[in-house]
Amino acid sequence: MTSHGLPDPMPARMGWITSVDAESGAGFTLDDGTVCRLDRTSAWFDFWTRLVAKSQEYGWPVYVLSDAEGAVALLLHASVHTVEGIQPDPDDTSRVRVRLAGTDAIHFLKIDEPGGDALALRLHEAAESGRPVVVAQDALASEIVDVRFAPAVPPSA
Amino acid sequence: MGEPGPVPLLQLPTWVVLRERIRAEEALFEADPPPPAALPGSDGNPLSLEAAGTLFTDMRGADIPFDFAKSYCSARAHEMRRLMAAQGVECRKVFFHAAKDYSIRVQHPAMGTILWSYHVAPTVAVQTPGGVVRMVIDPSLFEGPVTIEEWRAVMHCDKAVLEQTSGAIYQPFDARDDDYKQTERLLAEARLAAEAWRLARETAWEDDGIVPDQDSDEDDDDIARTA
C-alpha cells in the first residue's frame, strides 16, 4: 500500500488537462493523451469534478494516480514553482523542509519513503539550476508527493 | 478745460480692484490645489475602534478561506485590500519575514502547527484612547483587530523581520498585483485546497473510525484566537 492507502503500484502522472468529457463530466484527457475516468461513487467525486474544471480554466497541472483502465484513484492539484531552498527539518529527521517561490508555506518532503531520495535530488537540482518544477502535495499534510521538471511552455488546452 | 490725464491706480473703481484680487486668489488656488481628503483607515483619518471591529467582521464574512491558514496569506491580504478599497477604506500591509533557512511557527486552532516563510495581513489606522495606532485585520489568526505587537506575538521565529509597506505590495520583494488577477487565481487555488483539506480530514476520520468532536474545536480556538 502507498502512504495514501492506495493499491501499489499504480502509475502516477503529472500533466495538464487538455479536454473534459462534456457529456459525462466524469472524464478528462491529459496532455500526454492519457484518458482518465472519475469514480462517481467516490466521496471525492464532486470535489474532483470542480478541480478538473478549475484546472482547465486556470491552466493548472494535476497529479493523477489511475489504474490501467484509467479509473482515477487519486487526483491532486499541482503547481509550478522555482525552488528557493531545501533544508533538514529539525523537528522530524524523516523529512526535509522545502521553500517554493510564490508561496508563504513551508512544504515538506518525506525522505524515508520509497522514491523520497529521488524527489529530494530533483528538488536540489531545481534549486541549483533555477529550473521550474511541477509540484504536487497531499491535501492533508502538505507533504510533497511528486516533483517533475516543468516543460518550457505549458501545454494549452 | 483740458483732456483728463490717466486715472491713478488708487482711484480705480472698487469693483475693478476686487475683481483683480479675486483673479489673483483664484490663480493661487489653481497653482496649488488643496490636498485630497485623507481616506478612512489612513493615518490622517483613523477609524474608530467600533468601525475597525465592523471592518474585521465584514472581512471575516467575505468569501476568503481564512480557515485554510497553511498558505495563501498574500492572496487573502490582497483580497481584503480590494474589499476595503471598495468600502473607501485605505489599508497598508504588515509583513513578518523569516530569515533564509528559518521558519515562522504558529499554533493554529484548526490546523495545528503551521510553518511559514513569511506572513502578511492588512493594517488600518485606528483611533484609540491612547492615540492613533495601526491595527491588523487577520481573521486567519484572530477574532478581532489586534495591534501589530499582538499580531507579531503569536508568530514564533528566532530570526525574522517585521516590515510595514504600502497596501499595494502583494508579496515579498515589492511584488504587486494591481489588477488582482494573481490574487483571484491564488484564491481559487486556496478555496480548493481548503475543501480538499476538509475532505481529507473527514476521510481520515472515517478510515480510523473517529467521529469529529465539534466541542473540541471550540476548546482549541483558545490557543491562538486570543484577541
Image (cartoon, coloured by chain):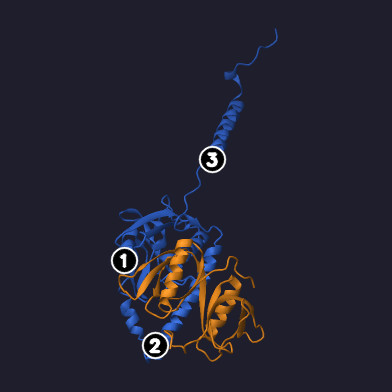
Task: Work out whether mark 1 precedes mark 2 in sequence or the reverse, and give the earlier one.
Answer: 1
Give amino acid for label 3.
Pro
Relative horizontal placement of residue A126, taking residue A15 as reference (left or right):
left
Judge if badges 1 and 2 mark residues of a common chain. Answer: yes
Q: Which residue is mark 2?
A: B205
Characterize the local packing of mark 1: few (<14), some (14-19) or many (20 or more) Cα atoms within 10 angstroms.
some
- For the residue pair B155 and B36, the one nearer the viewer reads as B155
- From this viewpoint, which residue is outermost toward the top? B1
Apparent colour of chain B:
blue
Q: Which residue is mark 1?
A: B154
Q: Check residue B33 in the rendering and tell me which mark sits there, or answer none.
A: 3
Judge if badges 3 and 1 mark residues of a common chain. Answer: yes
Task: Work out whether mark 3 precedes mark 1 in sequence or the reverse, and give the earlier one.
Answer: 3
Give amino acid for label 2.
Trp
Q: Quadrant of the C terminus of chain A?
A: bottom right
Apparent colour of chain A:
orange
Distance in Å between CA atoms under marks 3 and 1 = 45 Å
Tell me where residue A28 appears, x and y as whole percent: 61, 82
